[in-house]
Amino acid sequence: MENEDKQIKQKFSIELKLLSILLFFGLLYIFVTPPFQMADEDSHFKRAFLVSQFDFIPQANEKNELGFYLPKAVLDFEADNRYMMGDASQKFNYQKYYSTITTSTDYTEKVFSQFSTVETNPLLYIPQALSMLLFRIFIYIFSLGKSELINPMSYMYAGRIGNLLFFIFCAYKAIKWIPFYKRVLFLILCMPMTLGLVSSLSYDSMVISICLLFISLILKLSFDKKHEKINRKHIIILCILSFVLIELKQVYFPIIFLFFLIPTSKFYSTKKKYLYFSLITLAGIVNYLLWAVISTIHGHFGPDQSDSTNQLIFILSNPFEYFLIIARTFYHLSFFYTNSFIGNLGWLDANFPPTFIYLYCLLILLTAIIDSNKNISFNILRRLFIFAIFAVVVVLIETGLYLTWTSIPSIGGVGYAQVSGVQGRYFIPIILLALILLYNNKLSKYLKFEHNEIINTMLIAFCSFSCMLMFFLLIIRYWIPAV
């Protein structure tokens, strides 16, 4: 009984530490990182701002271009802060920061604007937009209707905070639900790349959190003996997650097939199991088709420079050669993938030392071997099934960018020898599926409570060091001028 109490305390400890690290360092990064200093944050800011204004559907201008009419003040704010993008020699201007945050703003004049997230489903910006909206209401009430006191930079910070808080909620639920690999998940959630994304306006925060939440819940329902039967509440949650999942990035949707890990005995019948799976799948497809219809009605964003049709024909005509292209890509870009998975911050111009990158990877791998639940085991078929889903998603990620990005003649063209555009951060939402190959529950019986406490302390200390190193790197990159 005493041992069980200790185990409960251990689980609670790692969840509490996760909340502390994410909240403290996340808020720190929000205000230390200058505006638009995460990949595509400029486009995410404009889309989130529009959603907060209940402007969801793009419209065509007189040239039949698809976009939005944005306040000129918002576009000026973006233009004033573009000088640091991709230029490591540029630093944030202290005086500009002070004057911007204290200046009232006129939002009446509007200008037509095109940007990369014009056709993105507004659902992906609910956390950021809701936070912006609540902030606007708060200021409006306490300033007696003087909404011009809210400047674009304040909106940006409000959106970042909303994004972070949503991620923290999902991360807490995920680490609470998952029946094993709590420490592995802890390391993934505290990676510099993860923290950089969730403390920005990027919808990658939702991509990571929803995918990990879905995977954690499926594993809980599959292996937690407390859940003897799957009830309506579980199916509703899975339907909601599926509804959001397909709109994040369609390439991640195959993870819904993890549903078949849940034993049939937990359903009233095999027919019921397939019925529930159909409902979960349908929830995602309906949402996808709904937004696809709306997008079609309002046209498409800009001219398509890619040659995706001929690229697809090339792939189908040369499947073996395409397999070699993917293998070649992983071989030649192995460090770039690893670096941008662990912590390639900013516009890929704020880097950690390679030693730190490899050390973090090694720690994740070692933790995946020793972090287990003695009551949960995986046979070969289950491991292969889970890894197959991971492999399918990886191929879809590579193929998606090979079709839409690599096929652009100036980038590579049809049949190019390597996939361009893929970054390591795209694998964060699914990396748990690959790590399960290393799972070994036999080691857990050799680890006593004291050993687990030492491991937990070391992991928390390492993650705290990682977060402090990230803070130092951001200060050096954006705030301290070169001598």
Image: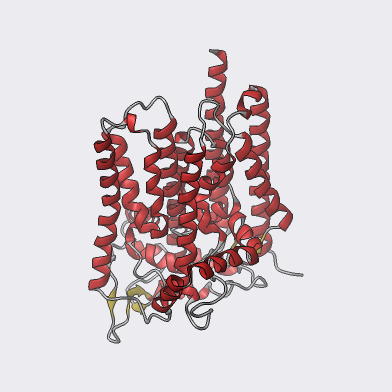
Q: Position of residue 91 (x, y in %)?
A: 64, 69
| Rendered view: 310 above or below 326 | below
Q: Position of residue 309 (x, y in %)?
A: 39, 77
| Rendered view: 270 above or below 255 | above
Quarter of the figure with residue 227: top left
Q: Is residue 76 visible?
A: yes
- Tell which residue pokes out farthest to the top in this image: 1
Q: Position of residue 215 (x, y in %)?
A: 44, 43
At 32% from the left edge and 82% from the top edge, which residue is drawn? Answer: 65
Q: Is residue 138 visible?
A: no
The answer to which of 478 and 406 lies nearer the viewer is 406
| Rendered view: 351 above or below 187 | below
Is residue 189 left or right of 313 when viewed as pictured? right
| Rendered view: 377 above or below 282 | above
Q: How many marks?
A: 0
At 35% from the left edge and 62% from the top edge, which residue is drawn? Answer: 147
Q: Position of residue 230 (x, y in %)?
A: 31, 32
At 27% from the left edge and 86% from the top edge, which residue is drawn? Answer: 62
Quarter of the figure with residue 235: top left
**Applied colour scheme:** secondary structure
Position of the C terminus by quadrant:
bottom right
- Tell which residue pokes out farthest to the right in this image: 483
- Tell which residue pokes out farthest to the bottom in this image: 63
